[in-house]
Amino acid sequence: MAENGPIGWRPSRALLALPPGLFVLVGALVPMAILVVFSLFRVEDLTLVPAISFDSWSKIFVDPLYRHLVGISLTYGLITAALAGLFGYPLAIGIWRMSNTWKGVALIVLLTPLYTGDLMRLYAWRLVLGTEGLVNAFLLWIGIIHAPLKILLFSPFAVHLVLFYDTLPFMVLGLLVSLERIDRDLIEASRDLGASPLDTFTRVILPLSIPGLAAGGFAVFALAAGDLLTPQLMGGTSGVTAMAMIDNLFGTAFDWPMASALAVALLVSLLACLVILGLAVSRLPPVQAVLRGGAR
Amino acid sequence: MSLLMRAYLFVFAAFLYLPIAVLAIFSFNASELMSFPLSGFTLDWYASLSANRTLLTGLLTSFLIAQPVAILTTALGLMAGLALTGKRLLWRGAFIAALLVPFIVPKGVLAIAQIMLMSRFGIPRGPGPLILSEALVILPFTTLILTAVLVRLDRRLEEAARDLGATPWTAFRYIILPQLKAALIAAYSVGVILSLADLTLSMFLAGRTQPLSVIVSSAFRTSLSPDLNAMQVSVLAVTILVVIAVEIVRRRAGGRPVRFAEHDATAEGEDIAARTG
C-alpha cells in the first residue's frame, strides 16, 4: 500500500543520512586522511616542509622505541578489556535478572560515574590512592603496613585500575544489550528439558551473549588503548604510552609528521587487533552455531 | 537472586562510588590538606567557591559551549536515527561504521588530526571548532539513544498518515516527533553532560577559551585544593539530578511507544505484504 504513495517520500528518509554522514566525513574521515598526508612531510628548523619524505615512517619501523610504545598502548587495552569482561560479566547477569524498576536504578548507578568526566575521576582516584589517601590511611590504621605504600599511585597498577573503572560501564552495557535480546523461552525450554542451571548458562546464555561480550570488549579495548589522560596523570613514568608520545611530539616537539606517523601506526595496530580478535571470536564453536542460525 | 550475587553487585556499586564519595567528603572537611584523618565539618569551601571568579567563569563558558553541542549532536543523531530506521538506506553498513569512527579513534588523535586539517585552511582554534568536535564525538551516543526508540515505533501509524495524504514533514511532526519527546530530552541531556565532562578535546581545541575542565586540570597538575572538590561535587550533583529527571521522564513517556490496540493477524499480514510487495 505504501508503494502507491507519492513517489520519492521513502528515499527522502534515507537522504537524512547525508548531514550526519557529511559531518563525520569532514570531522573525522578527512582529518584521518590528512594525518596520513602529514606523516609523509618533513620538519626543518621547526617549519613543515610539504614534500614527500619517508623520514618519520623509517623511524617508526627502525627505532624500537615506537614499537615499544604502541605495544604498551595495546597491552593496556587488552588487559583492560580482559578485566572488564571478567568482572563485568557477572554484573551484567545480575542486572539482567533484576525487575524493570531495579534495572532502571542499576543503570543510573552504573552510568552516573561515566558522566562525571575524565578529570573528576582522575582527581578523585588521586585522593583514594595517594600517599595520604584513603587506602593508605586505612591500611595504616588497621596496622597492616607501617609506612604509606607509594606504588598505589603513579604506577601501572594505578593506570590499570582507573582504566578498568572508566571502561567497565561500556562492557556491562554491551553485555546487557545482547542479554536482553535472548529469547527467555530458550532458557525455559532448556530448563524444562532437564538442563542444570550451569548447563543452561554455558550452552544457552553464554554463547548467545558473546556478541555483546565482543562489542563491549572492542569498545573497552579502543578506549583504554587510546586514552591519553589516565596514563599521563596516574602512571608517572609508566604512563608513557604511544598516545602520550603523540601528544608530546605534536605539542612540545612540534614534529607534526612524526606525531602523525605514530598516530597512524597506533590506529592501524588498533584496527588490526580488533580484526584479529573479531575473527578469533567468530571461530569459536558456540558463535559458529549462532552465526549459522542455530539459535536466535 | 542469590546472596552472593547481591554482595557482588553491592561491592561493585561501592567501587564505582568510592572515589566520588572521597571527593565529596573532602569538600566538607575543615582542612586545607586533603589527608586522613578528617578534621571536622565545614561549608567554607563552598563559600570560597562562590567567590572564585575564575572557576565560575569557567563553568559559565563550559555551559555556553555545551548548549550548541547538545543541540547540534541531537539534531544530527535524530537524522542518523531516522535514516537508519528507514527502509531504503543504501550503504547501511558503511554508514554505521562511519558513525562509529568518532568513538573508536582516540580523542587525542582525532583532535590533533582536526587541528592539522584546520591549519591547512588557516582556521584558528577556539570555541567554534571545539563545539563541532565535541558534537562529533558525542554523535554515536545520541544516535544510539534515538535509534533505540525509533526502531520500537509502530511504522503503520506513519504509513497510515501518509496514505491519508500527510506530507513527510506533517507525518514526522504529528506522528513521530510526539513519540520521541523523551528520547530527545535524554539525547540532549547526554549531549550537555558529556560536553561538560570533556577534557581531552578542550585541551587541544579550546585555544584561548577556558572551559572549566581546562582550568581545573591546570590547577590539578600543580596542587589539589578543597574548593576544586566543592566545584566538582556541585557539578556532579547537578548531573545526577539531570540523569534522574531524564530517567523519570523517559519511563513515563518513552517507555511505551504508541501502538495499535488491535494487533490482529490481518494487520500483521498487510504489514508484511507492504514490506515485501
Image: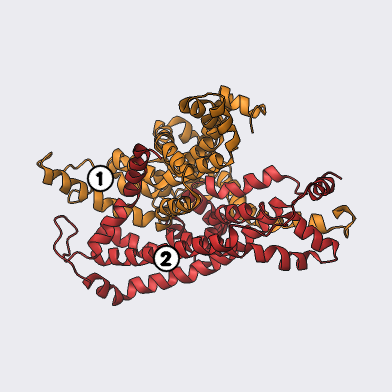
- Name the element at disc 1: loop
Q: Position of residue B176 (x, y in %)?
A: 70, 62
Give the answer, above or below, for where A124 lies relative to A88.
Answer: below
The C terminus of chain A lies in quadrant: top right
Residue A243: name its quadrant: top left
Q: Which residue is mark 1?
A: A153
Choose between B78 and A152: the one closer to the eye.
B78
Chain identifier, colour orange? A
Nearer to us of marks 1 and 2 is 2
Left or right: where does residue A250 sit relative to residue B250? left
Label ID, residue B82 = none
> Which percent across, then down, holds residue B96?
64, 46
Residue B157, given in percent of the width and then of the height, sits at: 76, 59
Secondary structure at badge 2 equals helix
Residue A168 showing in the rendered view: yes
Give the residue number, with chain letter if any, for mark 2: B241
Is A206 placed above or below B268 here?
above
What amino acid is found at the position of numbered circle 1 in the picture? Leu
| Amino acid identity at mark 2 | Leu
Is B164 placed above or below A17 here?
below
The subunit carrying tag 2 is B
Q: Is residue A22 visible?
A: no
Residue at screen point 40% across, 56% down: A117
Chain letter belonging to callout 1 = A
- Colour style of the rendered protein structure: by chain
Q: How many marks?
A: 2
Q: Colour of chain B?
A: red
Quarter-wise, where is residue B242 in the image?
Answer: bottom left
Badge 1 vs badge 2, beta-carbon distance below 8 Å: no
Residue A244 image position (x, y, % from top left): 39, 45
Question: Same chain for the residues at labels 1 and 2, yes or no?
Answer: no
